[in-house]
Image (tube, grey):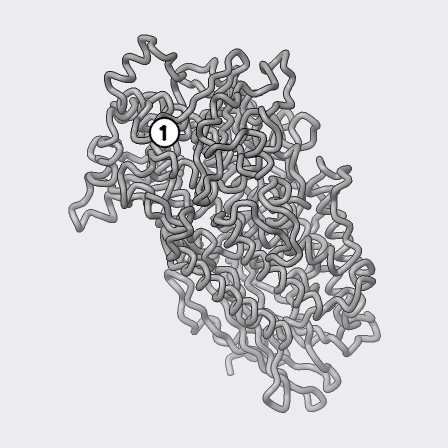
Amino acid sequence: MPRVLRLAGSLLGNNTPSDQIVYKGIVVVQKPSSLCVTDVGASMVANAANFLGMGITLQLISSTAIDSSTNTGKLSKPAALEKWLLSPVVLFGTDEVKYSVKFTVDPDFGLPGAFSINNGHLNEFFLVSLTVELPGGGKHVEFPCHSWVFNSRAYKTKRIFFSNEFYLPADTPKGLITARYNDLIALRGNGSGTRKACDRIYDYDVYNDLGNPLLNAAKRPVMGGSKEYPYPRRCRTGRTIFIGVETSGLNLLADYYIPSDERFSSVKATSFLADGLKSLTHGVLPILKTVTGFKQTFGSFKEVKDLYDQGLDLSKIVTAPINGIKTPFQLFNQLNADTGNTSFMKFPVPQVFKADEKGWMLDSEFAREMLSGLNPMVIEALTEFPPMSTLDSAKYGPQKSAITEKHIVNLLEGLTVQKALDKKKLFIVNYHDSYMPYLDKINSRQKIYAYASRTLLYLKSDGTLQPVAIELNTPYSQRVFVPPAAGQIDWLWELAKAHAAANDAGYHQLVSHWLRTHACVEPFIIATNRQLSKLHPLNTFLQPHFKNTMAINAKARKSLINAKGIIERTFSLRRYSVEMSSLAYKGWRFDQEGLPADLLKRGMAVPDATSKGGVKLIVEDYPYAVDGLEIWTAIEKWVTDYLEIYYKNDASVTSDPELQAWWSELINKGHADKKDEKWWIKLDSKKSLTSVLTTLIWIASAHHAAVNFGQYAYAGYMPNRPTTTHRPIPEKDSDEHKKLLADPERFFLSCVSSKMEAILCLLTVEILSSHAAEEEYLGQRAVENWTANANVKAAFVAFGEELRKVERSIINRNNDPALKNRVGAVNVPYTLLYPSSANGITGKGIPNSISI
C-alpha cells in the first residue's frame, strides 16, 4: 500500500478498532455540469486533496448518544468518500454519482440524526442525499440534502444536514439540540457584509436596487421603509450603498445574490437558458432599436397576424454581440443553422386568436375574461351607484362617477339599476383610484396617453356577463362609452375597451401577479429559513412552495421591474409602474389573500358553511372561483392532516418557539411596513395555523398559476391585451374621429402598443408562460424520501388523489355547454387551475411554487 494512502487511511479511521462498529453509507452528488463555471486549477487541487484523504469527509451526529465532554450528540470518526477520482465526470445535465462511505462509531452510538460535511475541494458540488444503513440489515436512515456544498473555508461553522425525521423544538432529541441551534444561527448571519455566492445567509432589505442614482432618467424611489412607498422586503445582498441605494458596480449583467440553495437547479437553468433565446434578456431592447420601423405601430391586424404566420424577420436585426454577450437572436441563428431557418422567428399562435381571429373583439369575450382570463381576481359586486372614488377631488377630479342610469338601463333586461343592485347583477372592474394619481405624469410623456377606467358589467339571465358601460377619466375629464346595438361596430367603443384592457394588463402584471405573489411571498421564504429549523416539520413542509422563487425574483429585479426594464418599456405606467404596486400594497391584507376571504371581500360570494371553502358564489359560472375553491379545499385538508400529526393541541402551537418567532419576524421584519395593522392573524391555535399555511400555499401555487400560465394564450395577441396606450380617444365627429372611421384598424393600432412594445411583450410572455422540464406540480414532490413518517406519506397520497378528482371535475365542466363562461367564443377552455401539465406552453398546471 503506497505510503500516502496508508496515511490517509490512518487519518480517516479506515482501520476499525475492535471495540467500534461500522455504519455503511451511500452519498449521492451532482458534480458541476457544463452550465457551471469550472476551474481546471481547482480540479487539480481537488485531485491532490483526494490523494491526501482530505477531499470530502463526513461525520455522523448521534440523536441519542451524548458525549459527556461536550453534552452534545456523539460523533463518528471522519469518513471520506470512496473512489471520488474514479467516478465519471458529468459533462452536461444532472446525472447523479454515488459514492460509498464507512462511518466508524462507538457501540452505543445509536440512531444518527444529523451529519456534518467538510469539502476540501475548491469547487462546490451539489449534495443530493446520504443514506446510512444501520447494523443488522433492513433498517436505514435517510438524509435528503439537495444543497450546494462549497469549500469549507467559505463557512464559519460546519455544514450540517439532518435526517428526514422532524421534531417540534420541545421534542428535539438531546443529541441534536446544539446542531439545530447552530444551523439556524448560521443561516441568519449578522446583518452586515457583502454576500458572496457561497453564502447561505437569509436577511431582509428594502427594494433600493431598482434604479441607478447616477442617472437622472433611471433614479427610482426606494420601495419599502416609508409611509409613502410601503413594500414587502426582499433578500439583503449587502452590495455597495450609494446615496442609500444599492449598486452592483459596472457589471450590470451580474446576478444579484441569493442564498446558494435558492439557485435554479441545473435542469431549471438549462430550461431557462433555452427558453431565453426569445426572452427578456438585456440584449433584446438594444437590438430591436436598430431595426427601422420597430418603433412604429402596426398598420393592420394582418401585420400582427404575420408574427405567427410568417415570423419575425431576423435578417433585418443586428446579431453582433452586445457588450460581449451573445444575443437571443444570435443564439437562435446558431441553433437553426442546420435547418436553414435563420431569417424568421415564428411565434406560436395564441389560443385567444387561434379558433376565431375576430372572437377577441366580441363584448361577450371581453367580459368573460374578467371571470376566466388572466386577471379574474379584480371584478367585484357593485354595491353603490354611481360608483365613488376616495381620492381628493381637488387634485383628481370628481369623486362621483359620470355613469348614469340612462347610460345602462336599456341593457338590464327590464330591471332598474336599484333592482339590479338588489339582485346582485351589477359588477365593476375599477381602476380609477389605482391609475388616477399617475395620469398627469404619464400623459405628460411624449406619445403616451392613458385613462383611469371603470367598467360596469351586468349578469344576464344566461349566466354570462355583458359590459354595459366603460368610463375613462383623467383629472380634467370624464367620458362614458356604451356598447352599440347588436350586430354593429362602434370603433369608439372598441377603443374604450382597449384602454380598459390596458389598465387591466398593467394592474394584472404589477399587482395581481408581481406584488401579490412574487414580492409578498419572498419574506415568508426568508423568515422560514431564519426561524424554522430544518428539523422543524413546517420547514420541509413549506420548502416545495418556495422553490426557485428567490432566484426568479432576483432576475425580475434585473430585467423586469427595474428602471428601463421590460415593464417600464412596455406598460403605460412607465417609470411609475412599481410605484403603483406600492400604492396597492397599502391595501394589502394577508388575511384576505386566501380565496374564500378574497371572494367575500369583493362581494363575489356570501358565507355558506355547506359549500366548498365555506362560501357560495354570486356568479355560479365563475371558472376561476369554482375551480379555485376545489383546489383550496384540497390544500386545506392536506394542511389540516399534516398539522394533526405534529401538533397535539392549540397549546402546542402557542408553545412552539420557532413557529412563534417565524410569525413574529414575518410580520415585524418581512412585512415591516404593515406590522402595526390589527388584522394580522394571531397564531394561537391549530385552526389559525391552518389558515395561515393554506393561504400561503394557495398564493404560491394556485394564485400564481392563475395569473401567470395563461399569459401567452391571452396576452400573446397584443390587440386583445395591449399594455400601452398612445393616443386619446377622439371626440365624436372630430377630425380625429373621421380619421378613425376612414381606416379603423390603422387608427386603433396607432392607439395601442407599438411593434417594439408588442414584440418585447410577446418575447416575455412566451417564456413566462412556459413550464420547465423538471417542474413540480401541486401534489407532487421531486424528493421522494422527504419524510420518514408513514402517516405523512399516506396523507400526501390522499392529497394527490384529491387533486386528480379536481382534474376530472374541470374536464367535465369544460365539456358542459351550459357553462358558457368556461370556453367562450374564442374556444379557450379554462384550465389554468388544472393541477398537472406537460412541459412548455400548455395553459394549465399548478406548480408548487412561484418558479417563473
Whether residue 11 is visible here, answered yes or no, is no
The three-letter code of the residue at mark 1 reads Glu
355 vs 507, left or right, is: left
In this rendering, would 42 be left or right of 762?
A: right
Question: Which residue is drawn at the image coordinates 48% and 71% (left, top)?
Answer: 84
Q: Residue furthest top?
A: 735
Residue on which disc 1 sits: 757
Q: Position of residue 15 (x, y in %)?
A: 62, 85
Q: Tell me: residue 749, above or below residue 41.
A: above
Q: Position of residue 324 (x, y in %)?
A: 35, 36
User: Which residue is more in the foreground, 514 or 773?
Assistant: 514
Q: Where residue 179 sits: x, y (%)?
A: 73, 65
Furthest residue toward left: 340
Q: Quadrant of residue 268?
A: bottom left
Image position of 51 with respect to 722: above or below: below
Question: Which one is in front, 291 or 793?
Answer: 793
Residue 47: image x %, image y %? 48, 66
* Picture quadrant where residue 359 is located: top left
Q: Residue furthest front?
A: 414
- Residue 288 showing in the rendered view: yes
* Of residues 473 and 703, the one drawn nearer to the viewer in this rendering: 473
Q: How many marks?
A: 1
